[in-house]
Image: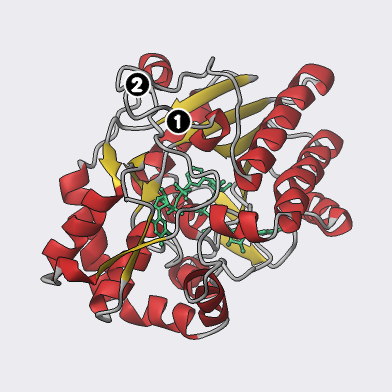
Amino acid sequence: MTIIVTGGAGFIGSNFIYYMLKEHPSYRIVCVDCLTYAGNLSTLEDALENPDFRFCRINICDREAIYHLFEEEHPDIVVNFAAESHVDRSIADPEVFLDTNIKGTAVMMDACRKYGITRYHQVSTDEVYGDLPLDRPDLFFTEETPIHTSSPYSSSKAAADLLVLAYHRTYNLPVTVSRCSNNYGPYHFPEKLIPLMIANALADKPLPVYGKGLNVRDWLYVEDHCKAIDLIIHKGRTGEVYNIGGHNEMRNIDIVKLICRELGKPESLITFVKDRKGHDMRYAIDPKKIHNELGWLPETKFEDGIIKTIQWYLDHQEWWKTIISGEYQDYYKKMYDSDSSAN
Ligand code: NAD
Ligand code: TYD
């Protein structure tokens, strides 16, 4: 069994590669990643020592290179994680989101059609459903909730989802789509809420909370997401969408306060900054379908997962300090230092 994992040098993709190498030691895993600012080869250091693992620096929009790889590897399954993934960046500059998230998805699926695979899996997000109001805690996203996006990021992911389902109907490509809530855990790029707050708190820097910090996200430990995808690619029904989430809703401000408490840092570091444009209020997944059909349930409770995650960032300071010392500094200045910050 050979699996191509795109975006495997990023946060969730790398966790998925380690999960699969551990759970399926007989599989060959081929990682395709062009190493954007968010991709980090050092994350895959341990995997690179495994003879059943191969890394290929390829852009998923590069049709020729992708076709060539399929000719070499004859993959059975493709799991597409590769994407531009940060909402704030999509607001500042949408174009690359359209290229990678939409066109790149089409190239991967065209290769699957041309060479034949048993499964193409698209890793999508709950953000394609838009947001829910704070005063309706009874509402959740189901697989039937209409697509209703807010940001260029979520719109590009939604466009890709529609394309994937169209390839199933039109060409009978054996696809599945998963829509997961916010992940947290090791190797999370420090531009996202949890790792950014940990890194800033450790450096006694201000903790920039957008608006009033009342927005709610539904947090899932990354390994639980990997386990869900493993189940879907092996047992999920083709042509189907599966929502993934663990009923763990938290307000941003409460997460930031928890991080302060765990690190022994004062809440006075919290700084309320201008709100994100079009900021989604609440995400909340109803995971009944994947639970009933595939028996998936999250295993890591948030109280444990967040402690493990904070400890990981304490133990791996070199990993994230190297990342935030380079090009990321310019991004940080642009987003948080001027009046146009994070808006
Ligand atoms: P990430 O930004 O950490 O990693 C993305 C990876 O894709 C990077 O290694 C990058 O180099 C690579 N990449 C980007 N453009 C590429 C291209 N054109 N060709 C090849 N490689 C390219 O992202 P993540 O947080 O790990 O998210 C992975 C996937 O999961 C994305 O599709 C995202 O939409 C989805 N998702 C993320 C979350 C979350 O909470 N992070 C939740 C639900 C779904
Ligand atoms: P993020 O990690 O960017 O994920 P997403 O926007 O995909 O949910 O942000 C999570 C929440 O945290 C979101 O409501 C925006 C908020 N946020 C801040 O308040 N401050 C920050 O510096 C960042 C990066 C995010």
Instruction: Mark 2 or mark 1: name the one nearer the start of the chain.
Output: 1
Q: Quadrant of residue 185?
A: bottom left
* Relative height, residue 7 to residue 287 (above, below): below
**Image quadrant occupied by the N terminus:** top right
Sort mark 2 into few (<14), some (14-19) or many (20+) by Cα contacts within 10 Å: few
Whether the residues at callouts 2 and 1 have beta carbons within 8 Å, the answer is yes
Disc marking residue 190: none
Find numbered disc 1 in the image and state the secondary structure of the residue it sits on. helix
**Does residue 125 show up?**
yes
Q: Tag 2: residue type?
A: Gly
Q: Quadrant of residue 37?
A: bottom right
Residue at the spot 49% in from the left edge and 75% down from the top edge: 42
Residue at the spot 41% in from the left edge and 64% down from the top edge: 187
Where's ligand 1: which quadrant? Answer: bottom right
* Relative height, residue 126 to residue 139 (above, below): below
Left or right: residue 33 versus residue 123 is right
Residue denoted by label 2: 295
Residue 80 is situated, as x and y percent measured from the top left of the image, at 63, 45
Find numbered disc 2 in the image and state the secondary structure of the residue it sits on. loop
Residue denoted by label 1: 231
